[in-house]
Image (cartoon, helix red, strand yellow):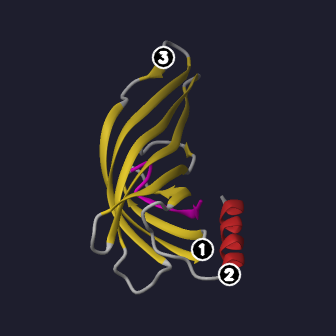
Amino acid sequence: MKKMLLLTLVVIAAARLTTRAQSFQKGTNVVAVGVGLGSSLGSFTSSSSMPAFSVQYERGVWDIGGPGVISLGGYVGIKSFKYSAHSGGYDFSEKWSYTIIGLRSAYHYNGLASDNLDVYGGAMLSYNILKYHYTGEGTGDNGSYGSTAGLTLYVGGRYFFAPAVAAFAELGYGVSYLTLGVAFKL
């Protein structure tokens, strides 16, 4: 986590020395990599948890008139939790692994005075895959269960420090409530 944060800061500092970006337009392609904070996935009794990670892609598809563009894209996010216990000679562990695969669409508002800022809001239709693994004495239910479709609303913003590099923050429900990361225009 510390290495990813350091890499993000180095990329942002290096990119700051270059020219201005343009706002999100029809035909713009963006790939973003993020780390999630906070989540409703998992158990409050988990003894260990990995951070949430996500990768997003989107393309500006419709210029709808006025100050905005609608994008379409995809999303993949992962997160897992593990719980282990020892009681009276009985040891067991449980692991929940979540994978969220989604199709996203967003409205990017281009009416701001800054070409470096991309603000957006949208919706994601997803399939939320849950895998469960039990290790210990007795029988356990290993496999997939609880997988379901989902609909998510989100809002976010990107600040482009260079024409092709941005820092972003997004609120909503994907694999986490808040996602921070780096976005790249292709």
Amino acid carrying mark 1 in the image: Pro
Instruction: Tell me the residue that label 1 is attached to.
Output: 163
Q: Which mark is residue 140?
A: 3
Residue at the spot x=61%, y=69% of the render? 165
* Residue that appears at 50% across and 79% down: 116
Q: Position of residue 162 (x, y in %)?
A: 62, 76
Q: Quadrant of the C terminus?
A: bottom right
Q: Is residue 22 magenta?
A: no
| Left-right relation of 166 to 141 | right
Number of marks present in the image shown: 3
Circle 3: element type: loop
Tell me which label, 1 or 2, sits earlier in the chain. Answer: 2
- Label 1 and label 3: CA atoms lie apart by 52 Å
Q: Work out whether mark 1 precedes mark 3 in sequence or the reverse, and give the earlier one.
A: 3
- Local packing at callout 3 (Cα closer than 10 Å; few below 14, some 14-19, many 20+) is few
What secondary structure is marked by label 1? Answer: loop
Q: Which mark is residue 18?
A: 2
Residue at 39 percent of width and 36 percent of height: 128
Mark 1, mark 3: which one is toward the viewer? 1
Q: Nearer the viewer, residue 84 or 49?
A: 49
Q: Which residues are magenta?
A: 174-186
Q: Quick check: 170 above or below 77? A: below
- Circle 1 packing at 10 Å, graded few (<14), some (14-19), many (20+), is some
| Residues tagged 1 and 2 counted as in contact (Cβ below 8 A) | yes
Which is in the foreground here, disc 2 or disc 3?
2
Question: Residue 90: x percent and y percent?
Answer: 56, 22
